[in-house]
Structure formats: C-alpha cells, structure tokens
Image: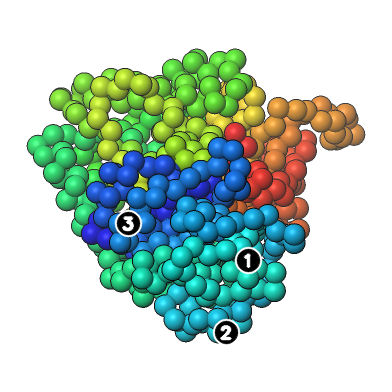
C-alpha cells in the first residue's frame, strides 16, 4: 500500500472505529501498539499518525507512554483524548485531574477554523469522555477550540504539524467528526486517497502470485462470506492452481453442502473437494463444554484434515484462509497493545503451533463490510456476499455446553427457521447477523395438556457495520411471535424461546 495512516493503540474502545473512519476516506489505516518498535514505524513511512484514546491517566503508574522520537519524524500527528494528553505530557505541558469530568455530549467552540476545522461551523456538538484535562500547553502550541469546561479542547503546533483533540471525532455523536478526520488526512497529511477495492484486488492478486509462483494453494472453504471471498480472490489470482476443500464437520447449517457445490463448482468453476469428517470432529468434541477448548479442537482438526487431503493433491505448500482484521484484533489484544483480548478465533489462536502448510491470509487487513464489497467486485452472488456471518467452529459454539447429535439436530432445525422467517419478513439484508443458540438448560412447559421439561432456544439478531460493536435488533413483535410458534411447534425437544437484547459491548455477538 503506497500510503498509510497508523493508529497507535493506547487502549481505546474506539481504535477500530478510528481505523474504519480513515478507510472510509479512501486512506489505508493500520492499528499498531503504542510501543511498536520505532524502526518498524519509521519503515512504514506513514503519511500520518493518530494517537488513540485510552482509560489511563498520564500520571498513573504503568500508563502507556509515547516514544518521543516520533515527534522528530516530521510526520503529522493527531492525538485523540488520552493521545492528546500523552503528547502534551511528553512534550513538557501539564495535565491535571479536572474538578468537573466531561462524559457525553458537549458544545465545542472553534477558535481557529484553519486546517483541522476548515469548513466546520463555529459551534458544534462533540463527544467527551475524560477525567483529566490539559492545563498548560507545551512550547509552540496554541488553542484551536474549547468547551465550557475544557479550555484546551483542541490544540496545535503548526510548525511541527502536531494536533490534539480532547473529544472523539470518530464517533457518530460528534457533529462533523468525519469532516475533521478528513481534514487531518487531506489538509494536514496531504493524502491522495489510494485505498479502494480495485486497488486492493490489484495489490492482493499481485502478492498472491509472487508468493505462490508455481506452487499450489489449498483453500479452507466454509461457505461463509470470508472464506468464499478468499476463494474467489485466489481463483482470480492463480486459477487452477487453487484447490478448495470444504470440510463437513457435522456442525454446519442445513443443506450447506448442496448449496456450496452448486455455487462454487457449477457457477464459479472452482476446484472443490467435499470431505465428510463429521464423525471425526464429533468424537474429539465428546464431553467438551469449555468454549475455548471447543474452538481449539475444531481449529486443530481442520488443519489436520487439510494437511491429510493435501497429500492426495500432490505437493501443496500453501493454505489460504479468510481471517479478517477484527479476528486478529480480538484474538491478539490489538497486536500487543493495552486493549483486552476478547476471545480466541478458531482461525487465529486455534491453529496448531506447528503447521506443515504455509498460511496465506489476504483479507487479514479488511473489515467485514469491506469484504462484502470485495466479494461483489469479484462477481460472487448476493446469496454469498450478503450472507450473515457464521462462526468457523459452526454450531459448535452456538450449542452452550456439550455437543451431541441430538443437540445439533435441535439447533440446526431452529436456526433454519430463524433465517427463513427473517427473510420472509424482509429483514435479512438490514440485519448484520441472526441465529439461534441452544442453551444448556431445560424448562417446564405444557403441551397437549401434559407437562414437558425440554430445551430452551435463544434468538440473537444484531445490527452492526463491522462486527466490532453491535446493537440488538428491535424485532417486530409479529416476527418474534412467528419464530416462537414455529420453533416450539416444529422442533422436537424445545418448549421455550427467548430473545437476546444485549448489545456489544458489553456482550459479544456470539454466545461463545
């Protein structure tokens, strides 16, 4: 990528949102830990650096510190919230606890409408989240904006191209926040805007060809958006040197095998081998209830199957996989930064330490919505591109507790009803993800004048853009009514249906 803006992670919950806002402006962004090796940062030659917010105080023991050498690179820097405070502290200014904390919306008064605030109204609403304030500016800095409670709500040293904002321009609650970020990218950093799906396809196919050369690639095709787009991208890059393997692990959606055979073999002309390994997977999962253990077992078995199957295809060196940026972020604590690890993804932390195949993950820098755009550009049908996310471990992490053939049957039937009814209601395209979860409890019910004691199904439906944050869908009551009636009447072994009304955060989208 010819131009990049780096986001240094100081522990903000909005890191991914900052990165997305940059990409929306057609500039490539990368999130790196605040303590990234200085040599690595310099070699990237970023057009700009953004210092994220974070929960710490600059005076707190163990608080993340800025490597002062970055201020001598001559690269424009924008500090957001804690990032601004850390910059001020590192350059000799003073940061102190405030007598009146600012959380939520505040009125921002712009004192200097050049560069960062060019074209922005003099008074806007911004989103604050801080308990410390800048009391004294470092030498060379001046004020750009203030609020009633924060004297230095935005600052600048124009000679060194150092900017700071105490508020969060990346969140939707800040008026003109997107424009402020755009001003930093184009007015201050002088970006051109090279980040498009067309440029990504060109770069990715070139890198794949250079890496693979005359070799063969095995692709882990699951039928989800990520792996499907990965397969289409490799097919474009290397054609018949791509060999896709679809593993039926016994934890798939109903009729999944037939659907994929039709789309990828008949329509796309991709080399595809279907391996039925359900008995193998289920035997290894017998008695296992811990979600992390499930993920690791499933991840390990996937790789073993691929390695075994590759032997029948001649010498294969590479394994293609549809790992996305949020997978990496959630599994590795923002690449070693202070953000928390959420959970291990089967195709990140679940891989064996020693693999016989070299892994290639061309989508690892993309968010989900970017992958959907990529899929459309590569000619995949909407039935694949617009498909709701499905976890790599499949129904295994939607069965809370032990995985049995009976539990799989119940969940598979219930899940199909959820998707059918949401599509009938015309809600499928507007919902990010919807599915059923089988809970590890039973409840008392009455059916046919007789007492029952059977399973409980939870329905989960969320709205999101990239999966990093999500809100529960305010499902119409009539749809919920149909879902409940159909599942209880049609799925033997279920007598109660509940609806999950939790957002992410604090909850995750999947239950495990």
Q: Quadrant of residue 126?
A: bottom right
Element assignment for label 3: helix
Q: Camera-side residue: 315 or 267?
A: 315
User: For the point 50% across and 81% down, which residue is it?
Assistant: 112
* Location of mark 1 (residue): 127
**Is the C terminus in the top left, top right, bottom left or bottom right quadrant?**
top right
Q: Earlier in the sequence, mark 1 or mark 3?
A: 3
Q: Camera-side residue: 44 or 404?
A: 44
Q: Camera-side residue: 308 or 488?
A: 308
* Location of mark 2 (residue): 122
Q: Camera-side residue: 35 or 491?
A: 35
In this rendering, does residue 31 appear at all? no
Q: Earlier in the sequence, mark 2 or mark 3?
A: 3
Q: Is residue 347 left or right of residue 307?
A: right
* Mark number, residue 72: 3
Element assignment for label 2: loop
User: For the point 50% across and 15% down, which residue is it?
Assistant: 283
Instruction: In the rendered view, tell whether residue 311 sits above or below residue 163.
Output: above
Residue 412 percent location from the top left of the image: 58, 36
Instruction: In the rendered view, tell whether residue 332 sits above or below residue 365.
Output: above
For mark 3, does the 10 Å Cα neighbourhood hold few (<14), some (14 to 19), or many (20 or more) residues?
few
Evaluate if marks 1 and 2 touch, with contact meaning CB atoms under 8 Å apart: no
Q: Earlier in the sequence, mark 1 or mark 2?
A: 2
Spatial CA distance of label 1 from label 3 is 30 Å
Q: Quadrant of residue 107?
A: bottom right
Residue 317 percent location from the top left of the image: 19, 29
In this rendering, does residue 218 appear at all? yes
User: For the point 49% across and 15% down, which residue is it?
Assistant: 284
* Closer to viewer: mark 1 or mark 2: 2
């Amino acid at each position: 990528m010819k131009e990049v803006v780096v986001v240094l992670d100081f522990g903000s919950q909005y890191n991914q949102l900052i990165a997305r806002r940059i990409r929306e402006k057609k500039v490539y962004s990368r999130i790196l830990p605040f303590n990234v090796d200085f040599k690595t940062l310099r070699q990237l030659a970023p057009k700009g650096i953004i210092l994220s917010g974070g929960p710490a105080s600059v005076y707190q023991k163990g608080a993340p510190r800025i490597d002062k050498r970055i201020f001598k690179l001559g690269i424009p820097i924008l500090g957001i919230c804690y990032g601004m405070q850390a910059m001020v502290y590192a350059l000799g200014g003073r940061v102190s606890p405030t007598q009146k904390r600012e959380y939520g919306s505040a009125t921002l008064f712009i004192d200097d409408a050049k560069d960062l605030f060019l074209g922005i109204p003099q008074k806007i609403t911004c989103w604050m989240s801080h308990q410390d304030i800048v009391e004294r500016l470092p030498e060379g800095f001046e004020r750009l904006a203030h609020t009633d409670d924060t004297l230095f709500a935005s600052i600048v040293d124009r000679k060194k191209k150092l900017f700071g904002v105490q508020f969060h321009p990346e969140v939707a609650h800040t008026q003109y926040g997107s424009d402020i970020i755009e001003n930093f990218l184009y007015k201050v950093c002088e970006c051109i805007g090279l980040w498009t799906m067309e440029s990504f396809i060109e770069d990715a196919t070139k890198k794949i060809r250079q890496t693979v050369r005359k070799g063969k690639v095995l692709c882990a095709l699951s039928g989800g958006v990520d792996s499907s787009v990965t397969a289409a991208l490799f097919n474009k890059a290397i054609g018949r040197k791509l060999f896709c393997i679809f593993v039926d692990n016994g934890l798939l959606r109903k009729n999944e095998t037939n659907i994929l055979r039709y789309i990828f073999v008949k329509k796309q002309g991709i080399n595809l081998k279907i391996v039925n390994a359900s008995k193998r997977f289920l035997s290894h999962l017998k008695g296992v209830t811990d979600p992390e253990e499930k993920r690791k077992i499933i991840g390990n078995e996937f790789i073993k199957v691929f390695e075994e199957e590759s032997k029948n295809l001649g010498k294969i060196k590479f394994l293609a996989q549809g790992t996305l940026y949020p997978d990496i972020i959630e599994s590795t604590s923002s690449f070693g930064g202070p953000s928390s690890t959420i959970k291990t993804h089967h195709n990140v932390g679940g891989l064996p330490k020693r693999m016989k195949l070299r892994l290639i993950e061309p989508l690892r820098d993309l968010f989900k919505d970017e992958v959907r755009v990529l899929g459309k550009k590569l000619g995949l049908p909407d039935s694949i591109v617009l498909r709701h996310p499905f976890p790599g471990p499949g129904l295994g992490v939607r069965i809370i507790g032990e995985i049995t053939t009976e539990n799989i049957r119940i969940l598979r039937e219930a899940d199909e009803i959820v998707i059918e009814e949401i599509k009938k209601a015309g809600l499928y395209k507007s919902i990010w993800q919807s599915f059923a979860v089988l809970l590890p409890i039973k409840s008392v019910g009455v059916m046919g004048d007789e007492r029952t004691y059977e399973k409980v199904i939870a329905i989960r439906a969320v709205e999101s853009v990239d999966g990093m944050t999500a809100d529960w869908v305010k499902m119409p009551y009539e749809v919920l009514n149909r879902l409940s009636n159909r599942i209880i009447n049609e799925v033997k072994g279920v007598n109660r249906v509940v609806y999950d009304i939790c957002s992410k955060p604090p909850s995750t989208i999947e239950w495990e």
